[in-house]
Amino acid sequence: MSVCVFGWVACIIQPSAPKAPNIAEAQEQSEIYYDIWDRDFELNLSNLPNSGQASHTPYSGFWYPENKGGTNIAITGESVLTKYDRAFNGAGFPAVQWEVKHHNDKTRNWVGHCNGFASAAQRHVEPRQSVVRNGVTFTAADVKALLAEIYQHAQIKILGGRRCNSVHISETTYENVGGAYCPQGYMPYTITEASGIQRLKCIANKPNRMANEVLSACEDVNAGTFHLALTNWIGRRQQSVIFDKEAYNQVWNYPIYSYRITESRYLSRQQALAMVLPWSGQSQDYPFNRAATRFYFVRMDMHYADVHDDYERIGQTKLAKETYTYILELDDFGKIIGGEWTAQSYDSHPDFLWVAIAPIPTMREDEARTALGISNPTALYQYMRNKSNPYISIDEVLSMWAESAGLPKDTRPPMLVSSIAGAWGQFPFFSVMLDGDTRGLVFLGKKVHLDVVFSNESMKRDLQVRLNGKNAKLNYESEAELGYIIAPHAGVNSLVVDMDGGKSEKIKFFAIPL
């Protein structure tokens, strides 16, 4: 599996993998979807919605470029990190000093906090009012900046695709698009900078997809996976997802909130081939996925929240749209088992899709040096710069966000997955399952089946189950199993399985609001 740190470093690349178990990629997404939402990740094209919109429209934010100071940018007066240090860290301004040292890439004008902005905007409603902490006033814009910082280091789930640095971009840039010359082996590529200026670069041609059933190590998100992710996550669950818009080396993350399929039609095998490889002629068989028996052309409009170019703006969501065309590859049962990008989307489509779960605390340098055994200063620096600022408290920022958004100060955005203390579900004499799963995923808003399965059925009579201090009501019983129906509340729940009135196994888990 590829390992990515968004914004700065490349993926650790796996060897080339067959495309047909791009079915395997779909199965992996099915497991993620099963864990977080329901038991089914819909693969059948006819059952997937042609449009969808997230229940929460992400806000637009600033991406805090590193070449301008990261979140230490001071637009007027003090930077938000200076304010934070004054309120919480005292003399020495450690949050400022850490940002200056670690988020300071001056060589690449695209490196910044877009992944932090996208994660925060996906999970949070926009802050709207100022809050005061220890005598220091933080504006709504300040709170958005702090959210972007703490989400630089977050737990995420990749929904398809990967990023790597193997696509070489020449350093030559051209001020005027259209009249430039690219050397052999390179293709012209237009980039739009944050200022709006368009420039032309010469980029190494992507590997030719002629007669290729193998995905390269740097293959972007497959068109079939892209379609499945958006239609399942946004269409069926109204949950926004994040995409890297840039198809090449740069990373620009934005939260997607809606999509609409504007064209969908059946294609013959030869028509599908002609759309992917228009120069191939009609004699060649469709080479990309030999398991595919049916083909559909799709044109999709996808809408996302764009970034602001100068600084944070409150209540001014900047919406943008991309249109993609692709072919879906189906099996005999109508299930999507792959896809190919077409026309302009062949070279311009998302690198990868992902969702943010929650911010992760970052160790300070002395803690990382001791806990991880990183003694080399360069290695320690590289480890730290790919994280969030360790001198900013996640809990404090989330409390500031809640108050700024007009919510109770202990409000937290809903988590997408469970958080489990200790080993879950497996004990010496019995195992515990929630809704048939040993991974502890439960949902607020519906009853949950809790099953205790015994290796020794004589132990059943000694068992008691308590949820949040109250005895669970027995629902059914078999020779080696006891079944309960429980209703967890939002947030952390405590489940106690008590043997012999004294031996207790305690499990904590999160219930997730739907």
Image: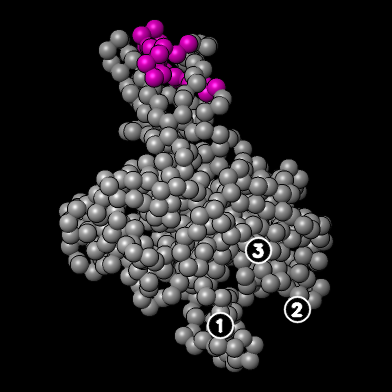
Q: Residue at x 49, y 88 (%)?
A: 172
Give the CA separation, mark 1 to mark 2: 29 Å
Q: Residue at x 39, y 19 (%)?
A: 468
Give the residue pinned by disc 2: 279
Residue 206 among those drawn in magenta: no
Answer with mark 3 or mark 2, whichever residue precedes in sequence: 2
Q: Where is residue 90 in the image (x, y as percent from the top left)?
A: 19, 53
Eye-nearest disc, 1 or 2: 1
Q: Which amino acid does label 2 sit on?
A: Trp
Q: Quadrant of the C terminus?
A: top right
The foreground one among 512 and 224 is 512
Kind of residue at badge 1: Arg
Determine the CA span between mark 1 and mark 3: 20 Å
Percent of width and height locating residue 507: 36, 26
Q: In this view, does 118 lie to the left or right of 469?
A: right
User: As rendered, which of 323 and 96 lies closer to the eye?
Assistant: 96
User: Residue 46, relative to residue 485: is it above or below?
Assistant: below
Residue receiving disc 3? 322
Judge by depth and name the residue closer to the eye, 312 or 34.
312
Q: Is residue 327 visible?
A: no
Q: Which of marks 1 and 3 is nearer the N terminus?
A: 1
Q: Name the residue under label 1.
A: 199
Q: Does the magenta stretch include residue 467?
A: yes
Q: What stretch is highlighted in magenta?
A: 447-473
Neighbourhood count class around disc 2 (C-alpha, 10 Å): few under 14, some 14–19, many 20 upward: few
Q: In this view, does 301 lie above or below 208?
A: above
Locate the N terminus by quadrant: bottom left
